[in-house]
Amino acid sequence: MIESLNENYWTQRYENNQVGWDIGHVSTPIKDYIDQLTDNDIKILIPGAGNAYEAEYLWNQGFKNVWVIDLSKTPLQNLRSRIPDFPASQLIHGNFFEHHSQYDLIIEQTFFCALNPIMRTDYVTKMQELLVEGGKLIGLMFKIPLNTTHPPFGGKEEEYRSIFSPYFKIEIMEEAYNSIPPRMGNELFVKMIKI
């Protein structure tokens, strides 16, 4: 099953409304982080963005340098229908690992857990490549048992620290105190700075 996590797989999930990860709004921990940002000009990427409620929230808060990337066109079209003036050039239909640019901030929300676990080191090195010096990776990671058959692929803090620490200063990696009720106790909020 893992081998089939391609564009067609994700598009079918959206078209069949099999989107259990989609909570229908920006998650509280990420919203609270965004609410503390003061520079609306920073360049932000949301990879594996899905319906990109984080991008919608940022846009509505005046952040116009927001970019989203997803393997499936469907959620990108969903975002564009909700925000018609969101620039099409900032909606990237493609593979995150083939993307090249530089960002001040990257927001992680259910992308890491959707990837085959063997790709985690590749994820970390790609994040480091995409961030400017001192750039930040923030977001949520599941703290649930790792399975090997289907997303979400979980994991634990010790594993995350071991793969990120060679490339990032881990400022925060702790259980989110403000998760939505169904995810309470199962999410780590992370804030990491490229080193």
Image: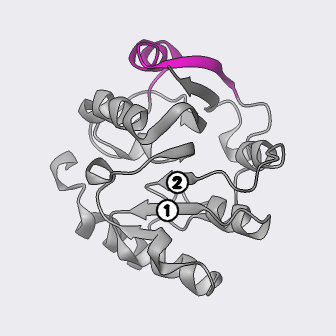
**x%, y% of residue 97?**
28, 47
- Say which residue appears at 46% left-offset and 14% top-offset: 165
The residue type indicated by label 2 comes to Ile
110 or 165, which lies in front? 165
How far is mark 2 from mark 1, CA to CA? 5 Å
Q: What element carries label 2?
A: strand
- Say which residue appears at 33% left-offset and 43% top-offset: 115
Residue 46 as seen in the image, left or right of residue 63: left
The residue type indicated by label 1 comes to Val
Instruction: Kindly identify which residue carries mark 1.
Output: 68
Instruction: Kindly identify which residue carries mark 2.
Output: 46
- Say which residue appears at 33% left-offset and 72% top-offset: 11
Q: Can you say whether 21 is above or below 77 in the image?
A: above
Q: Can you say whether 42 is above or below 176 in the image?
A: below
Q: Can you say whether 18 is above or below 103 in the image?
A: below
**x%, y% of residue 173?**
63, 21
Q: Do the residues labelled 2 and 1 touch (CB within 8 Å)?
A: yes
Asked if the stretch drawn in magenta spans residue 172, the answer is yes
Residue 80 image-quadrant placement: bottom right
Residue 162 as seen in the image, left or right of residue 58: left
Residue 144 as seen in the image, left or right of residue 163: right
**x%, y% of residue 78?**
52, 80
54 or 180, which lies in front? 54
Can residue 17 be seen here? The reply is: no
Residue 146 image-quadrant placement: top left
**x%, y% of residue 90?**
49, 70
Give the magenta part as a residue range: 155-175
